[in-house]
Amino acid sequence: MSSTAFPTLAVLADELRSGRRSAVDLVQQALQRAGQCAALNGFVSLQGDEALAAAAAADSARTATAAPLAGIPFALKDIFCTKGITTTCGSRMLQNFVPPYDAHVVEQLHAAGAIRIGKTNMDEFAMGSSNENSAYGACVNPWGSDRVPGGSSGGSAAVVAAGIVPYAIGTDTGGSIRQPAAFCGITGLKPTYGRVSRYGMIAYASSLDCAGVLARSAQDCATVFQAIAGHDDRDATSVERPADDVQASLDKPLHGLRIGVAREYFGGGVLPAVAQRCHEALAELEKLGAVLVDMALANAHHAIAAYYVIAPAEASSNLARYDGVRYGHRCAEARSLDEMYSRSRAEGFGSEVKRRILVGTYALSAGYYDAYYVRAQKVRRLIANDFAAAFASVDLIAGPTTPTPAFRLGEKSGDALAMYAADVNTVAVNLAGLPAISAPAGFVDGLPVGLQLIAPAFAEARLLNATHQLQRVTDWHLQEPAA
Amino acid sequence: MSTETRSNADQRGWQAVIGLEIHAQLSTVSKLFSRAATAYGAEPNTQAALLDVALPGTLPVPNREAIRKAIQFGLAVQGTIAQHSVFARKNYFYPDLPKGYQISQYELPVVADGKIAVRVDDGRRIDVEIQRAHLEEDAGKSVHDAFHAETGIDLNRAGTPLLEIVSAPVMHSAAEAVAYMRTVHTLVRWLGICDGNMQEGSFRCDCNVSVRRDGETRLGTRTEIKNVNSFRFVEKSIEYEIERQIRALENGEAIVQETRLYDPTRHQTRPMRSKESADDYRYFPDPDLPPLAIATADIERERAALPELPQARRQRYIDGLGLPEADADQLCADRANADYFEAVLAAVPGQAKLCANWVLGEVAAGLNEAAIDIAAAPVSPAALSQLLQRLRDGSISGKIAKDVFAAMWQGEGSADAIIDARGLKQISDSGALGAAIDAVLADYPSQLDDYRKGNDKLLQFFVGQVMKRTKGQANPQQLNELLRQKLG
């Protein structure tokens, strides 16, 4: 079919400012498309009426200098608290949870005039790589109805890929923005840890959780990143550092940019065709003046093990608040406090959440803490050191975002280890707190492939610059799924 | 009482070993990690921020004021202030613990290796090592009696900042433990970091108690008496616990490591829960909070701003002002008290003992009777010093001064105003005084005769009569001199 996609955010902003299009048109288009794509199950909830009202208000307040996101619709992962709007985090536990406050990211986008049309599907509490762990049903990849969209920000990736909204907000704890972006053929930016406030973002693993953007292009990611990044004194891990003007450096030429090609990221589990697409994308970057440097990350293969200790450990504590006492699911007619706790949690949590709570509780237990948690933290330090050492001689590090294109629904849902292993190229970035981007790099058997670029802390501008330059000379990011 | 217990234990060949964990609520306006108020006694759940309810997505942000207060304490006990300390999560489920964990400090506390000099009632001085002091948040409160068959939760207290002050197990009697607790109580109030209000739970402690045979160097199995909130209960519960443990061991029973509760009506402790079955708290560094970094400059700023500490001031009162130890102790039991004393003294220089007598005498009695703090005393230091100046310059006698003070306390005005209004000024004019003496001597010729025959005791009789005639306003010293001259 003809392009369902929105033009770039810059073009949309221009059209809105000039009055050639109205925000109401854009929101109607988004809602209509959401209706057409209902089978994707990308949204947990839609706020159509509120969005249309906000669009009408935006239109009547239209100015020639409106903010870049003003009047433009977007979708928000259902992990962010929205005042007065149910926030489920993909869990039955929070089926009826209506936050009394907005997350920082929500405030920022609201202040920028952005219009949220709905909240997107996700793996429960962001635990998963396929969106199959949602209490609200699996989300489907627009590139193939038998394929997962990736996770945990599966809904956010799917609704952008399907052309419902020009961009969506997701979160990334171990790859949850980059992997679905790769699977759905879009661009996903995971900023540096601490760049975007976590205030109001429901915690999975606090030291790894990071809000970011899923959009069609790096240029659009830059626009949205600019709106959500910055210091927030309500998050003690938020960095006190002004966000760079990432737009300004998008057009910098790439001459002399040193891109490290990490051998480990092209290792054993990576499908040769996927590796091939990434090498082709890197060749394009080389043509643009970048210098490819062969390199190694000695501890890369330890990342999965460290991640699957640290993340569940933090999760086991972060999720202790869901006890049925103050909000969230409470079981009926408990006869004792212990019964209320255990049944409320047994009923409210899905199996992957329970698995991670158990794993994490175990890892923190007396007698196991040193062997698991402390050891994993040491590995984390080694991994961070590897990156730091590598960035002494390269500017970016590249590799496939995922070993394979989107796998089939149900293909790995019975095998947690196989599912976890697919995170091999993404989790180390979170352990080191670095920014990374996944950008479309072609197709394998009609399914998108993602190229991951990793930068030193706070070098989002470099990531966006390189990706934008790549996207000026390639059109993978402009490809759309058939219907 | 306490010393007896110690000697009892000693006599029977046992030594008690006691360590205290004191919880001092830091007097900050807002909570340790949220901006909710900490004021006591508000309607349930009106002082709970989103974080205190543990809503999803909320995050803790450390209260700088609480950290400053912890630093002040650390410096006051000559401890090491950690330039990097770590907030850790203590995980357990309880309905009044909203997050399912308490944010505390575990491996790296903000204060370590302090010590404090303690004077025990029997006059001995002991140094008590303070192993650590760490910041942590308080839990909420379960309310069991307000609802039928249901428990209410009040989260007003949840997140209130506490400084947990952990002593080494170096005390050997209830008396030593109480003396230590009092010393810490004085110090935290002196520093202004805790209001010390024990009824409201602002200052409470857990007592770790064990006993061992004299000469034994290993520690015996200890029990922990939880949440004791008065000096008397600390003393009574420790005494009871020492006796209980000795009796058990002498009967061949083993001591079970457990947490016990003190029952103040029966004056005994009973088991609360056994440590063996206690939760595994799964401490780990709180990933929401970066390590707490304290710059040397911040520490030095606090050090420079530290007030003269009670021990130092007590010593200055003894060595510099020549006050008796008992006076110095009493004045320095409370900083407001000592400051009041010094404000009075500043206006009556060189009269430390006089000032101390008045502050510890009339002022203390007045405060006691009215059950108010010295901050609320109706007689200010300036007002009292004016009175003492009148006493010094001979305008009034000591006896009249007490009357004037009572009037000042009742709000009748300044010392001078009351002396004037009531015409209490001493008669120091030798003419007027001489006339009064002449009149008295004329009235009592036979007594005068006796005196002249050698009955010296009659001198006091004439003094009394002149005082009576002058309504007590005669300057006693001058009266004596003049009278002697006239009789001479």
Image: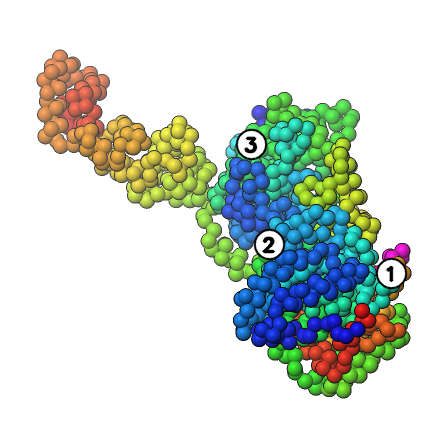
Spatial separation of the CA atoms under disc 1 and disc 3: 67 Å
Residue at the image point whose x is 76% and y is 63% from the top: A36
Q: Nearer the viewer, residue B144 or A114?
A: A114
Q: Position of residue A330 (x, y in %)?
A: 73, 41
Residue A281 occupies which quadrant of the picture? bottom right
Is A151 a magenta residue?
A: no
Secondary structure category for the residue under label 3: helix
Residue B240 occupies which quadrant of the picture? top right
Secondary structure category for the residue under label 2: loop
The label shown at residue A409 is 1
Q: Which residues are magenta?
A: A413-420
Crowding at mark 3 (Cα within 10 Å: few <14, some 14-19, many 20+): some
Amino acid on which the number 1 mark rests in the picture: Leu
- Asked whether disc 1 touches disc 2, contact meaning CB atoms under 8 Å apart, the reply is no
Spatial separation of the CA atoms under disc 1 and disc 2: 41 Å
Residue A242 occupies which quadrant of the picture? bottom right
Q: Residue furthest top?
A: B446
The label shown at residue B231 is 3
Residue B95 appears in the figure:
yes
Secondary structure category for the residue under label 1: loop
Amino acid on which the number 3 mark rests in the picture: Phe
Q: Nearer the viewer, residue B411 or A137?
A: A137
Residue labelled with disc 2: B61
Q: Where is the N terminus of chain A found, in terms of image quarters?
A: bottom right
Q: Position of residue B322 (x, y in %)?
A: 38, 40
